[in-house]
Image: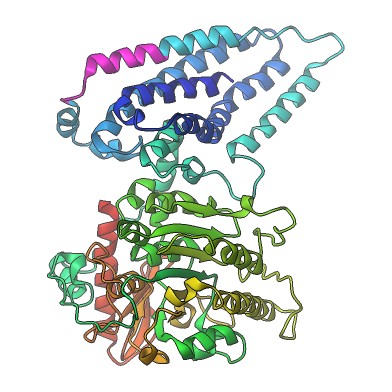
Amino acid sequence: MFWLLFFALGRGLFLLYHLASAKLLPAATLGGTFLYGLRLDASAAAYLSIPPFLFFIIASIAGPRFALGKVAGAYTALVASLLALLMTADLELYRAWGFRLDDTPLQYLNSPAEMAASAGSAPLLLLGMALLVLLSAGWGLYRLLLRPLPALPAWFGRRRAALAGLLYLALLFVPMRGGTQQVPLNQSDAYFSEQQFANHAALNAPWNLMSALLLRKEEQAPVAFMPDSAARRLVASVYPLAVGAPAPVNSTPSILAEPRPNVLFIILESFTAKLVGSMGGEQGVTPNLDSLARTGVAFTQVYASGDRSQKGLVSLLSGYPSQPTTSIIKFPRKIEQLPHLCRTLKGAGYRSSYYYGGELAFANMKSYLRTGGYEQFTERDDFSQAEQNSKWGAHDHVLFNRLLRDLRQQPQPFFATAFTLSSHEPFEIPTKPRFAGSDETALFRNSVHYTDYALGNFLREARKQPWYAHTLLVLVADHGHMLPGPWTTDEYTKFHIPLVLAGGALRPEVRGKVVATIGSQTDVAATLLRQLQLPANAFVWSRDLLAPAARPFAYYCYNDGFGAVGPNGWLAFDNVSRKVTVGDSMALSSLKRLGQAMEQVSMADFSRK
């Protein structure tokens, strides 16, 4: 309780210090900063409570000679003073930098002159008063809440007391991970508002700092394969905007019958092209997606940027490449600097909504989506318990039924995004299997078929709705899959995914068009925006796959390596051994150099954000 109230005082001080921004928030949103920040506060409080509970166990065994009150008091005074100092520094750092306390100040430790210059304009007297307020309030809280422990009753032995302390210690695990839910706590749990200042205010500064320090080891330094000038020159041949080169002239013909249709963006979990007949895969597994490909525009050579859902989400919605050993979505400060399809479309008058049958807090996705500007969210908790019929939440037919119901009332033009989940491990489905077998490949094949079946039912009803005639469907996978295999983690077929544009907004003459240009998942954003006649220059790692001069190339990442696909073959490169591990390329040297340049320049960009 002491730490919870201490953090609440810190949040109140933060809001007072930034009163000009806090005044713009409605009263309910101001209250929400405390309510939604409570779980992060509780997590930080639980971690801080570990030593006192250990002291309690020791004191229970040692007896009166262990001065528990003095030891716990000294610990609390020391830690509270340190945290008060950090929380006070956070007040001014946020004003200067626009993000909550993280590991950034550590970058200045080896340059004290820069640190002093950065702090030169800080109102030291005001900050000193804020620190004094926190320390005084903390001391008052401690005096109010903490009482000496009574002596143990004669019938309650020291060993029993130690066991009780051990149980208390074990129970701290629940608030430390944020509860008993499937997904552990992360910053997404504090992101509750469309107003970014409210989300930032809900964060717990010490918790945010520790999270950043733990993630710091994942922030891989850029690999120098070649001089930076050479790397940038190679990247310019594919993504000129990423290195500051002039933007290519857009001469892409329109495939749309109207300039600003609704956009229904459907992300298909783990839909590998190996199971999609229209993409050269197995026939009969995805008949509905194949039917859309035959009557829409099918991109048959598109590759996922990474191998996880959170990486695919950023690549699709921000047009940003993946990282080999981490994901930018884990770094709230970095994702705030990314462009976002939702934000761009919102500026053009689109209303936005996001649908997912599972927990959006998974892998920090919710903070990324909040930052992107989505106005309405539907996730696991928005479905009844009866509808949560999957390990992950609501199965795909339930998701599509909710989407169909809501789109009837959705103001147009809308940008609705739906992310399926039933084809995720453990591949449970609520229908009778279509394909025989009980091995993992058969389970996966049946789960993909079920999602396609649910998609088909949704589309049959959607075509009867007035909005469908004015809607562009974008159907694409978040990533591929090793199954059906066996394939290694770096095999290019694992990253091959379907991309289909369909819906009533397409021109009749482009239906059935096949685009065989080799491209990346990151290219979806610019391709879509060019068709909507909206600026795409902020999406520097994205290009228009429908442009006549688009260079055939795709780059993807996996753990400690990258892959590159070109018109003359493909290869995979291991960053540890610095060798090509597998590939089939008639132009091995040039493809390797381009892949190395992509990793070098994109990771340098990631590190700068």
Q: Residue furthest front?
A: 466
Nearest the eye: 142 or 203: 203
Q: Can you see residue 477?
A: no
Residue 601 shown left or right of residue 57 in the figure:
left
Please say whether residue 132 is one of the residues in the magenta stretch: yes
Toward the viewer: 140 or 154?
Answer: 140
Left or right for 228, reference 206: left
**Residue found 38% across the figure and 55% down from its top:** 328
Identify the residue shown where x is 38% and y is 12%.
133
Residue 222, horizontal then vertical, whole percent: 28, 59
| Rendering coords of residue 419 (x, y %) | 53, 65
The residue positioned 26% from the left and 71% from the top of the image is 533
Q: Position of residue 468 (x, y in %)?
A: 48, 74
Horizontal arrangement in the rendering, residue 24 relative to residue 28 (left or right) = left
* Coordinates of residue 369 in the picture (x, y in percent): 43, 54
Q: Is residue 456 above or below residue 282?
A: above
| Number of numbered discs visible in the structure rendering | 0
- Say above or below: 465 vs 43: below
Is 598 included in the stretch rendered in magenta?
no
Q: How is the image coloured?
A: rainbow
Q: Which residues are magenta?
A: 120-134
Q: Main secondary structure of the magenta part?
A: helix
